[in-house]
Image (spheres, grey):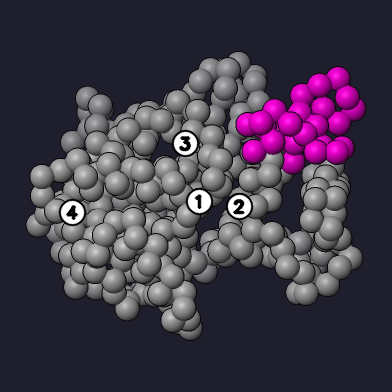
Amino acid sequence: MIKTTIFLGGGASAAEGAPVQSMLFKKYFKALRAENNYSDMKRVSELCAYFKQMFFIDVLHDDLDAINFPTFEEAIGLLDLAVRKRQSFKDFDLENLAKSSNRIGFIRQYLVLLMAEVLEDKTSVVKGLHRVLVERLGELGYLTDMVFVSTNYDVLIDQALASRDDIAVDYGVDFTNYISPAFSQTQSKPIVNLYKVHGSLNWSYCPTCNALKLINYQQGILRLLTDPSQAVCANCQSIKTPVIVPPTFFKDMSNSFLNIVWHKTETSLRDTGHLIFCGYSFPDADMHIKYLIKRIQTNRTDRLRITVINNYPGKKQEKIAEEKKRYSRFLGTNIFFTNDTFEDFCRQPEKFL
């Protein structure tokens, strides 16, 4: 069969039970109230202040079901744009000598950790669709012909691939504790590529050592909260940071490891004959993805086959039409839009390959 790339968007994780990014804040603050857990008062008070000043929402007292929360993209996009423009908001400063110095940076980190906390809670018990997909592809003998590209931060596909002893997973970069199998002298297993172009909740980065660590296929960023010792680099004692590029227009792609991942993704996609989008709505904010796909589509002699699998129960026809328009406007009309769900694809991928 021709080499196929399976592109996993947020809808693939949502099919497993993970929350979509538009529901992150409501779920987080509901859980916070229900558990009455304000152990990290600094983080909670800063998030409360940010939502109250910037969006006029009292997250501890207002009716959460009645609130029209900003999306995660909007909440963190304001901060990213302020950093890019070297500007501040009242009481939320960049680095300076003021008491609130770099408050923007701290709020941004808190929002990323908020997202990690919600995803950790919701993906701990899942339907297992990613594992069903990987197992079925293995049964068919197709698994090593697949390349996986994910925009998701969770580790659902990581865990599904890691559950198989007969393959080696290559993220496209070396970790301090996990060498890329493509360059390993002792590696003999077939390699399956997994490129996480927006980072991952099981990656931690030391900016002093310029080193990346893989945290055992688990969503380890939360350990920065629950176990402070995990935030300290064992080599230089610097504080490690998450490698997360939020879904905003203003993506910071300066991390050298992410640049390598993007390069490897483009190189791998050049050999792809069939691109399957799963749970991905082709959002306007993902211009980096659009740029990448357009380069792949135009810099080839043959026509790239494109399939879109993004249906789900109760999906409105207007939304379906909008997504088709976005895809067709940018990639042309030679696209196969299915009426199937991600679960359909996982259980019978052979129907679509």
| Image point (56%, 47%), residue name | 248
Q: Earlier in the sequence, mark 2 or mark 4?
A: 2
Q: Is residue 209 left or right of residue 60?
A: left
Report the Cα–Cα distance between label 3 and label 2.
Answer: 26 Å
Q: Which residue is labeled 1 in the image?
A: 285
- Residue type at mark 2 is Glu
Q: Secondary structure at mark 2?
A: helix
Q: Which residue is labeled 4 in the image?
A: 304
Which mark lies nearer to you, 1 or 3?
Answer: 1
Dominant SS in magenta: loop
Q: Earlier in the sequence, mark 1 or mark 2?
A: 2
Q: What's drawn in magenta, residue-wise?
A: 81-107
Q: Secondary structure at mark 4?
A: loop
| Image point (56%, 40%), residue name | 250
Which mark lies nearer to you, 3 or 2?
Answer: 2
Q: Where on the picture, by quarter, is residue 321?
A: bottom left
Q: Which residue is labeled 2 in the image?
A: 73
Asked if the magenta segment contains residue 104, the reply would be yes
Q: Earlier in the sequence, mark 1 or mark 4?
A: 1
Between 82 and 59, the one nearer to me in the picture: 82
- Residue type at mark 3 is Leu
